Image (cartoon, rainbow, N blue to C red):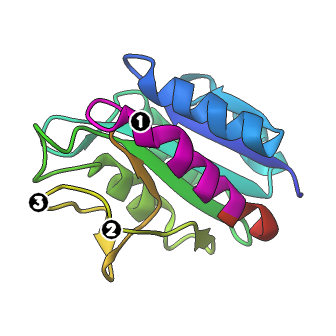
Amino acid sequence: MKKTIVIYGSSTGTCQAIANTIASKLGTEAIDVAKLEPAHLQEAENLLLGTSTWGAGELQDDWYDGIAKLREADLNGKTVALFGCGDAEVYGDTFCGGMAELYNAVKNNGVKIIGQVSTEGYSFNDSEAVIGGQFIGLVLDDINESHLTEQRIEAWTTQLKPML
């Protein structure tokens, strides 16, 4: 596997725990976006970017500076996968929408985006993280469906490994 890093933004610790689990399964490190340095982005060939979603589909706060760093970096030729967590029961109309902001920040920077996930098996009304009938990455509702989190992470990381 090429140099891969998991970059996450977490306010309550949920997205951090998910990022650490993903990093562990891939044998790599997880970095808090608040501690992200340009060197991290230069050295890695694969970036896994994760955020929790707040309010009406907004990014986790630390990602606003993180997105600026992504836009300043040369991401051309890198592989990117996205993951997000949210609450589909209370915020079913903006479920994991923060992930769409990460997608929009990198999609035109010469990256290859991998790791799309079927919407089957998820209960939500709407999400900006759905494009072409699929989630743009792994979405997790660790509040209402914590019993599925480990299984979904395992399936997703298994899907990603050959592409990293």
The residues tagged by marks 3 and 1 sit, at their Cα atoms, a distance apart of 21 Å
Labels 3 and 1: the sequence-earlier one = 3
Residue 147, disc: 1
**Residues tagged 3 and 1 counted as in contact (Cβ below 8 A):** no
147 within the magenta span: yes
Q: Amino acid at mark 3?
A: Asn
Front tag of 3 and 1? 1
Q: Quadrant of residue 63?
A: top left
In the displayed structure image, the side of residue 93 where residue 4 appears, left or right: right
Q: The N terminus appears in which quarter of the rendering?
A: bottom right
Q: Which residues are magenta?
A: 142-158
Residue under label 3, please give it: 125
Residue 119, disc: 2
Residue at screen point 62% across, 75% down: 110
Q: Quadrant of residue 122?
A: bottom left
Q: Please say whether residue 38 is visible from this viewpoint.
A: no
